[in-house]
Amino acid sequence: MPQSRTALSWLSDAVLYQVYPQSFADSDGDGIGDLAGIVERLDYLEWLGVDAVWLSPCFASEFGDAGYDVTDYLSIAPRYGTNDDAVALVEAARSRGIRVMLDLVPGHTSHRHPWFQESANTPGDHRYIWSDRIASPMREWIPNQGRRGGFYRANFYAIQPALNFGYARSNEAEPWRQPVDAEGPRANRAALQEIMRYWFDRGVSGFRVDMAYSLVKDDPGQAETAKIWGRIREWIDRAYPDRALLAEWGNPKISIPAGFHSDFFLHFDGPALRSLWDNNAGSLGPWSDGQPCYFDPDGKGSMHAFLAEWQTAEAAADGRGLIALPTSNHDFSRLVCGPRTRDMAVPAFAFQLTWPSLPVIYYGDEIGMRYVPGLPDKEGSQLDTQARQGSRTPMQWNEGPNAGFSTAPAEDLYLPIDPDPGRPTVAGSQADASSLLHHVRSLIRLRKQTPALGADAPVRVFHRDYPFVYTRNDSHLVVVNGRQDPAIAPVAGVDGALPLAVHGVEVTDGAIRADGFSYGIFELPRL
């Protein structure tokens, strides 16, 4: 990747907030969130202090996979509103200093997309991947119901046929494989760029790219897929230099050199993020995989796995991109899951918002919304044993009907409201100065006011156990204790540290004492 590529300045300073549109705010009383509802809640997001909002897919869809099965990339799904509503949201957010990013699904469409309907009935149309027989891997090949016959390759669910971006390698046993420069792959690359151009021209500030690694098939090291994104990044730098690309790749070592401005640390790619939160699946017992995590009440975890992976990713990014650190998302359990309560989540946010990453807050995590077990499948949310619907319940705004999410009858809601009578709400949290929400808001404000706590300043770790102790820019000390028991760290040279945000941490001569579930941020004296 050319050395001239750098991280976007606005993204480097940003705190990102993910909105699941069908569950955030319902303006018209049909039980499903919409774009107008998001507009009505922008004042809250401005108050919270976030800089950019990423919307999970809101394009036209059959909603067999909650919008990740697109039928028209250039149209907003009617249940969310219209294209004009999308532009109105972008403009209303911009007036409050908030950027809007959309979710792009480049590797597959719905089987009801007009492109697929044409291809399924037209021999010689190669927008998708076709074979006259079941190929390998067998589970990914689906019988075609159209006149063309044969089988198509699916990317995820059977209703999501893979767009054809070619194969990196030929195979005599599979003569239908097409190279990356064949007509179908070229058409899809051009269409991808036109989709992005359409929404960029309407003020969208960038895309989070779903399954960004999934384009070219049989692609060792994903080298050919990386080339596609590299060319797109070159075009964006020329035509839309302030727009951002965030990858759902989970491997910054590949994605950032390829051209993405940021990539996510993800639960499905190695143990690093699970070793922090352990919120991988939500349906496999009190914790997702039963492995120790650092932010565990019993204190059985370690920061070693996270730090090892972080150092590798940071070296690969080399200042040219950011590593996004999410609290959770629509595919994983919320931060408040298993035995972890919202009060126990306080130090986790302190870590996320002082680490040199791009912090991404999943809607509702800032008030301590919990993963809700035992809900029925909704729009493909039940994935084998993973009940993803437990992380997609409606935002809890107040104590009114449906927690202020919608005026619809309860039985018409997209998903049920958390039935726990002690569930947190935005209104209740705003009224409680000691709430998780106020901690998060204060931490966001401190990050903005203190460049040394942002994404660009260096970090040095002094104590990897409990408490976790590190400095930012050698000028600010951060202490985080993710367990219920108090902890002591022998750290010299911190005498006279000025407290900036302290919750149960004391700095004394040669030692740091941290209460259970505590954090402290200090400015160090200048030498």
Image (cartoon, grey):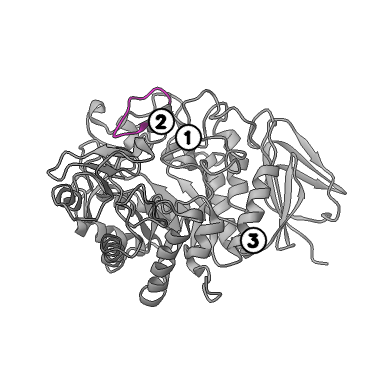
| Residue located 53% across and 35% down the image | 279
Of residues 11 and 256, the one nearer the viewer is 256
Secondary structure type for disc 2: helix
Coordinates of residue 343 in the picture (x, y in percent): 58, 34
Q: Alpha-carbon distance for marks 1 and 3?
A: 29 Å
Q: Taking 130 as reference, is 382 above or below it?
A: above
Mark 1–mark 2 Cα distance, whole angstroms, equals: 7 Å
Residue numbers of the magenta segment: 373-382
What residue sits 46% from the left and 37% below the top?
Answer: 332
Using the image, determine if residue 247 lies above or below residue 347: below
Q: Which residue is mark 1?
A: 333
Relative horizontal placement of residue 21, taking residue 248 as reference (left or right)? left
The residue at the point 47 percent across, 65 percent down is 259
Viewer-side residue, 60 vs 515:
60
- Residue contact between numbered discs 3 and 2, judged by CB atoms under 8 Å: no
Quarter of the figure with residue 291? top right
Query: Which quadrant would the C terminus be assigned to in this image?
Result: bottom right
- Residue tagged 2: 390
Q: Is residue 207 left or right of residue 252?
A: left
To which residue does mark 3 refer? 315
Kind of residue indicated by mark 1: Ser
CB contact under 8 Å: marks 1 and 2: yes
As displayed, is residue 435 above or below residue 310? Answer: above
Residue 347 position in % (x across, y down): 63, 41
Is 50 left, or right, of 193 in this rendering?
right
